[in-house]
Image (cartoon, coloured by chain):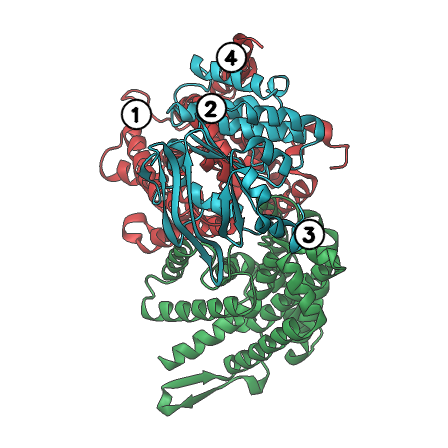
Chain colours: A green, B cyan, C red
Amino acid sequence: MLTLLFDGVAYGMLLFILAIGLSVTLGLMNFINLAHGAFAMAGGYTTVLLMQHAGLPFLLCVPLAFVFTALLGALMEATLYRRMYNKPHLDQVLFSIGLTFMAVAAVDYFVGSTQQLVQLPEFLKGRTELWDGALGMGHYRLAIIAVCAVLTVVLQLLLVRTRFGSQLRASVDNQRVAAGLGIDVNKVFLLTFAVGSGLAGLGGALGAEVLGLDPIFPLKFMIYFLIVVAVGGTSGLTGPLLAALLLGIADVAGKYYVPKLGAFIVYSLMILILLWRPQGLFSRGGK
Amino acid sequence: MSADIVLSCEGLVKRFGGITATDNVSLQLTRGARHALIGPNGAGKTTLINLLTGVLEPTAGRIHLLGEDISGLAPHQRVRRGLVRTFQINQLFDGLTPLQTLAMTVSQHLGQGASWWQALGRDQRVIARCELLLAQFHLTEVMDQPTEHLAYGKRRLLEMAIALACEPNVLLLDEPVAGVPAGERDELLRTVAALPADVTVVLIEHDMDLVFSFAKSMTVLVNGAVLTEGTPAEMAADPRVKEVYLGHGDSHG
Amino acid sequence: MNRMALSLSLAAKLRWWEFALWACLLCLPFLLPSHALLISEITVIALFAMSLDLILGYSGIVSLGHAAFFGMGAYSAALFAKHINPDPLLGLAIATAVTALLGAFCSLGILRGSDLTRLMVTLGVALILQELANKLDFITGGADGLQGVVMGPVLGYFEFDLMGQTAAWYTLGITLGVFVLLRQVVVSPFGFSLQAIRDNALRAQAIGIPVHARLISVYTLAAALAGMAGGLQAQTTGFASLDVFGFDRSADVLLMLVIGGTGWLWGGIVGAVVFKSLHSVISAWTPQYWTFWLGLFLVLLMLVGRERLIRPWTWGRRA
């Protein structure tokens, strides 16, 4: 059972890194970006392709995935997303679904629809058993937890200790006032979107081995990202983090103990939580 | 004691976390009252209206309308019993025309709101009432224009027309002339003055001229609590009221 | 202004072109007998889209899971025909009733919360139903779907033929009936109150409209009609499979409605025709990459502004 908990935490941390960009984007621009999963997929495929065709080592590809996806995000924000900010939510939903469809089809066309396999470096393979096998920790999952934990701390410091962080928080709180205070809201949006997408890409790269990678990745996992955001709220990092961990553990435990019901439990739990607290379990208040 | 108290609240309290927005407010309004509610910004006037209409749930206290305890009733149920409000910022239906808006409101009030088999406006009573309201609020020429295209003054008139279409016993007006251009203000003010005598009107306003010309009684709200109440003349003479508006320098419209 | 003028302003008479269009639609199975199956298919989808218009266009509820009801109707009708009684109208009535119950239950989930919450809840319900249909494979056939649904004759007389003529008349007739019903509903006080709720739920409440009760009613109705569409689909094609619950289906119907225009009831029909035509044309050209072009179309449409699609005179102007 401890192993389950461990796996659940790893999954949860990964989900957090994947979804935090979506949460901040929603909180900041009030934009429902269903294409967020496509950025994650982009990061995953960047890593795989660089490894396969350029022969680059895994440890290099992961940060490169972050950079590439962040640049992609910045480009898309400046050219496309920016025009959609003041449109109704329905339009934003359809727009991002459209982008997702395009991404899925494009990847299918250029790379093919088979599952991509990631060759992990040797030292990340393997497993450590503790307490007579009661706790089995895959080394890769351990690494994921470590990396994500570090990233979480870095993000928190960025938000709380830096100037950009306070500009971001001000813009989330009240865009007009922030602009009135001289904060360049456009720049905040651009950077935030870029970093959020980059993190998704990073998550996609890290998660390719654990979650699988194929062209329908965005569609498969979008619901999970949305759950993290809907349940965890869009103000701050703690809400989504807790929601992601809860989701990760629930999903892993559910699939193990009641495989027949599988995802059923997760969806039902989500609906029940949203019905009980429509603004999310951990958020400060409605969006 | 007058048997004609139409709206009253006792010990109304509303707390948001650590902030007390409404602090033990008690009010009594008689039939036909022309009552003003004044106070600096942030005094809790709109919160009080929200409590009375049921949009917010009070932390403590009770509300009575026409002798009935309405504290547990949903907002739409209070409207059915004659407690109607207008909003400081126009709350209109942009996709409908003024005629459609009023016809629907009147139909709802006549109890036909849920009828799905008859077209809107088949009932002659609805048509008659709309005709009156449109004329009264000078909306007849624009009755077929989508609300989103109306000029601000017309929108403000429609805002009030909708409330009157509900045939209120008690009407709560939240800064009805706020932002209205001078030309259209008089129209609006005349309409407010011409409200039926048996309708109880509570007016939230910052414009002291309007308050003094309209109100027969006033309540002054500061920091969520009632500072004092009485006739306009008494309020004008009360040094505490003057201090609230002038002394602390933190009130501007 | 006199009362006549007022009355006329409010009057919601059917326009001449609505009669004309329906007359054309009803002639189609005569004019294009070889396309009868396609006509059925489009009609069913149009009904589905009209039901979504009720909650999206008229009531402002953004749903990404309307297929939950389509699927429920499809499986109910299929199972009923297979195990209890193959009469089409009876089966359709049962499918509609069952889905209405589901709709009433689900409507409780969309009453509160933001657009995102509603998206999540509706999406979640559709996913749950899909999972259920998948796991309860001893009833539903699981991933293989429910095959071999043989229908009896409509009204005891009109057999379902291979060419699809009966299916085309059947679906068109039912859809026309629903259209007439909805046409009446949307111009009634009830219909206008829905639009009021869509435009400003706060004010709707403040004029005495019981917002939650209205939303429950319209959601139940829309669900029932979506179930009816699903039932028609199962009956006219003879099977039901898991994709009736799929996200693709929910997204497609949303797109169709947006293409055709929300809030004027014809949007579902127009959108279904346009969408299916686009699909045929593009699929013939690049069969497996339809999703790419669909995605591109969506992106462009949203950037340009969806209400401009049905107003070609605005295409030249800047937003």
Residue at horizontal 73%, vertical 64%? A71
**Which residue was labeled with disc 2?**
B197
Residues at discs 1 and 2 in contact (Cβ within 8 Å): no
Q: Tell me if residue B103 comes above or below residue A238 in the rendering.
A: above
Give the distance between the C-alpha atoms of the residues marked 3 and 4, in whole angstroms.
46 Å
Q: Tell me if residue A187 comes above or below residue C287 in the rendering.
A: below
Residue at horizontal 35%, vertical 44%? B71
Question: From the viewer's perspective, is the residue at label 1 or at label 4 nearer?
Answer: 4
- Residue type at mark 4 is Ser
- Quadrant showing the N terminus of chain A: bottom left
**Which residue was labeled with disc 4?**
C7
**Which residue was labeled with disc 1?**
C153
Tag shown at residue A81? 3
Chain letter belonging to callout 4? C
Residue C97 in the image: x percent, y percent? 30, 35
Residue at horizontal 59%, vertical 68%? A204
Residue count near mark 1 (Cα–Cα under 10 Å), binned few <14, some 14–19, many ≥20: some
Give the distance between the C-alpha atoms of the residues marked 1 and 4, in whole angstroms.
46 Å
- Residue type at mark 3 is Tyr
Look at the image and tell me whether residue C182 can be seen: no
Discs 3, 4: same chain: no
